[in-house]
Image (cartoon, helix red, strand yellow):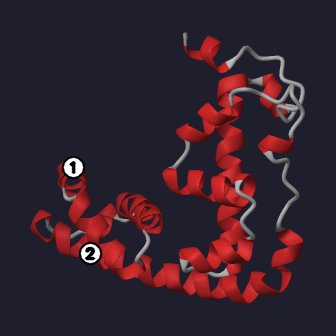
């Protein structure tokens, strides 16, 4: 069965292209593909023969794309009325105190490129959430969720880099400078 997973992993680009053509967003396609791989591992017992592994996985991918659109529709209906209420206030780097952690730029470069885009556009360039959503072809509710996840990823990366300083919000930076972390 490990060979089946290895063979499916070897076809990653093919599977990613399949999903990306259906959702028209590379970062969403990446997320769907990763979830499909996890689902395939958990459902490996349902695979009848090794020869049918690719067709079996394509069925999992099709179902994952359908689930994505279902969840997106539900998110839109659920979050749309409250979108302005769920967008947290953000401290912008250019407005932050001078003792703000110097590691933010490096940490931002370490997170998923799609999340980098969200943080840069919404938090740094101050593009309204609704404009970001429209430009990205997603609902405002989905954009709010993506922004939340992006900020979580950035926070996790900062905690990894800076430890206690990041847990305190990096507003009173006690960690060493970015160069000291990597040198």
Q: In the image, 97: left or right of 44?
A: right
User: Looking at the image, is 182 positioned above or below residue 93?
Assistant: above
Query: Which quadrant of the figure has residue 86?
Result: bottom right
User: Picture coordinates of residue 85 (x, y %)?
Assistant: 89, 73
- Label 1 sits on residue: 6
Count the labels in the image. Answer: 2
At label 2, counting other C-alpha atoms closer than 10 Å, the crowd grade (few under 14, some 14-19, many 20 or more) is some
Query: Which quadrant of the figure has residue 83?
Result: bottom right
User: Picture coordinates of residue 50 (x, y %)?
Assistant: 13, 63
Residue drawn at point x = 68 percent, y = 28 percent: 103
Q: In the image, 151: left or right of 110?
A: right
Dot 1 or dot 2, earlier in sequence = 1
- Label 2 sits on residue: 58
Residue drawn at point x = 77 percent, y = 85 percent: 80
Residue drawn at point x = 58 percent, y = 51 percent: 116
User: Picture coordinates of residue 95 (x, y %)?
Assistant: 86, 43
User: Picture coordinates of residue 156 (x, y %)?
Assistant: 68, 39
Question: The C terminus appears in which quarter of the rendering?
Answer: top right
Q: Which of these two is toward me, 44 or 24?
A: 24
Q: In the image, 72: left or right of 33?
A: right
Element carrying mark 1: helix
Q: CA distance from mark 1 to mark 2?
A: 15 Å
Q: Which of these two is toward me, 168 or 116?
A: 116
Q: In the image, 41: left or right of 35?
A: left
Residue drawn at point x = 61 percent, y = 41 percent: 108
């Amino acid at each position: 069965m490990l060979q089946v997973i290895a063979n499916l992993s070897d076809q990653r680009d093919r599977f990613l292209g399949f999903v990306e053509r259906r959702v028209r967003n590379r970062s969403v396609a990446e997320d769907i593909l990763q979830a499909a791989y996890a689902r395939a591992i958990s459902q490996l017992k349902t695979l009848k023969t090794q020869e049918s592994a690719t067709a079996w996985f394509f069925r999992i991918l099709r179902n994952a794309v359908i689930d994505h659109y279902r969840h997106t529709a539900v998110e839109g209906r659920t979050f749309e009325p409250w979108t302005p209420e769920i967008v947290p206030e953000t401290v912008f780097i250019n407005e932050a105190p001078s003792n703000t952690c110097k590691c933010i730029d490096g940490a931002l470069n370490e997170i998923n490129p799609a999340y980098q885009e969200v943080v840069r556009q919404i938090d740094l360039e101050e593009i309204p959430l609704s404009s970001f959503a429209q430009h990205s072809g997603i609902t405002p509710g989905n954009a709010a969720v993506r922004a939340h996840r992006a900020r979580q990823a950035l926070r996790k990366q900062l905690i990894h880099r800076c430890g206690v300083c990041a847990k305190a919000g990096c507003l009173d930076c006690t960690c060493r400078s970015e160069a000291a972390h990597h040198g």
